Image (cartoon, grey):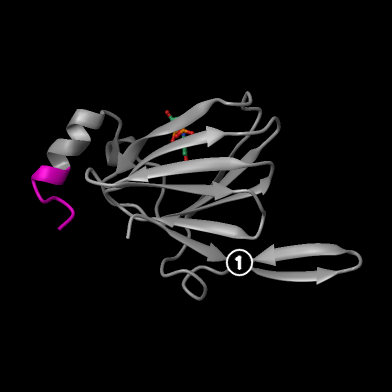
């Protein structure tokens, strides 16, 4: 599986909706870091990297974001068009992230602290890691 789209629990009432998830209980990792990306021009592409050892959950509380994931063999496209959708991406998956609408917000919960050494930002290098069996 390249990534897993999950439906996050949501409490809906006349006063509004509240979506939530808990590390370890609702997803199979704990969250050490949360970050969010915003003020991104419509149509802008971000991402374009893989992680050596990191689990992440991506969600879009406002707007619409398309995530294209790729394991070096196959690719799959997920559209985060509702705040209750969560996309889980594990290690060894290349991701391209497109901000489809103005003012879209991408939130990410990550299993570890920021570490630039954990990034693979060059696609050819990513393919070398795949071919080496690094994630097997
Ligand atoms: P990056 O993960 O490359 O963002 P995107 O995939 O959306 O393009 O992060 C962009 C920069 O932000 C990165 O070079 C360093 C900084 N950054 C941090 O300092 N801490 C973080 O937790 C993250 C995610 C990024």
Residue 112, given in percent of the width and then of the height, sits at 39, 53
**Which contiguous range is marked in magenta?**
130-136
Residue 55, given in percent of the width and then of the height, sits at 38, 56
Image quarter where the N terminus lies is bottom left
State yes or no: residue 16 in magenta. no
Q: Examine the image and state in which quarter residue 72 appears.
A: top left
Does residue 27 appear to the left or right of 37 in the view shown?
left
Residue occupying image coordinates x 75% and y 64%: 18
Instruction: Describe the element under mark 1 as helix, strand or loop.
Output: loop
Q: Residues within 10 Å of mark 1 (few under 14, many from 20)?
A: some
Q: Is mark 1 within 8 Å of ligand 1?
A: no
Does residue 117 appear to the left or right of 134 in the view shown?
right
- Given the current orientation, which residue lies at the most extreme right position? 14
- Given the current orientation, which residue lies at the most extreme left position? 132
- Residue tagged by mark 1? 8
Image quarter where the C terminus lies is bottom left
Does residue 16 appear to the left or right of 10 in the view shown?
right
**Vertical comparison of 106 with 40: above or below:** below
Residue occupying image coordinates x 47% and y 69%: 27
Q: Nearer the viewer, residue 113 or 48?
A: 48
Q: Magenta part mainly helix, strand or loop?
A: loop
Residue occupying image coordinates x 55% and y 47%: 79
State yes or no: residue 134 in magenta. yes
Does residue 73 appear to the left or right of 131 in the view shown?
right
Residue 128, given in percent of the width and then of the height, sits at 13, 37
Q: Nearer the viewer, residue 1 or 34?
A: 1
């Amino acid at each position: 599986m390249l990534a897993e789209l999950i439906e996050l629990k949501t409490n809906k009432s006349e006063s509004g909706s509240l979506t939530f998830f808990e590390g370890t209980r609702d997803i199979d990792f704990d969250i050490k870091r949360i970050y969010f990306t915003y003020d991104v021009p419509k149509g802008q592409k971000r991402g374009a990297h893989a992680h050596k050892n990191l689990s992440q959950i991506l969600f879009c509380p406002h707007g619409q974001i398309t995530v294209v994931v790729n394991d070096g063999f196959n690719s799959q496209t997920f559209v985060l068009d509702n705040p209750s959708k969560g996309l889980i991406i594990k290690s060894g998956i290349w991701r391209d992230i497109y901000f489809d609408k103005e003012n879209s917000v991408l939130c990410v919960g990550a299993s570890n602290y920021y570490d630039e050494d954990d990034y693979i930002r060059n696609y050819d290098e990513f393919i070398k890691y795949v071919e080496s069996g690094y994630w097997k």
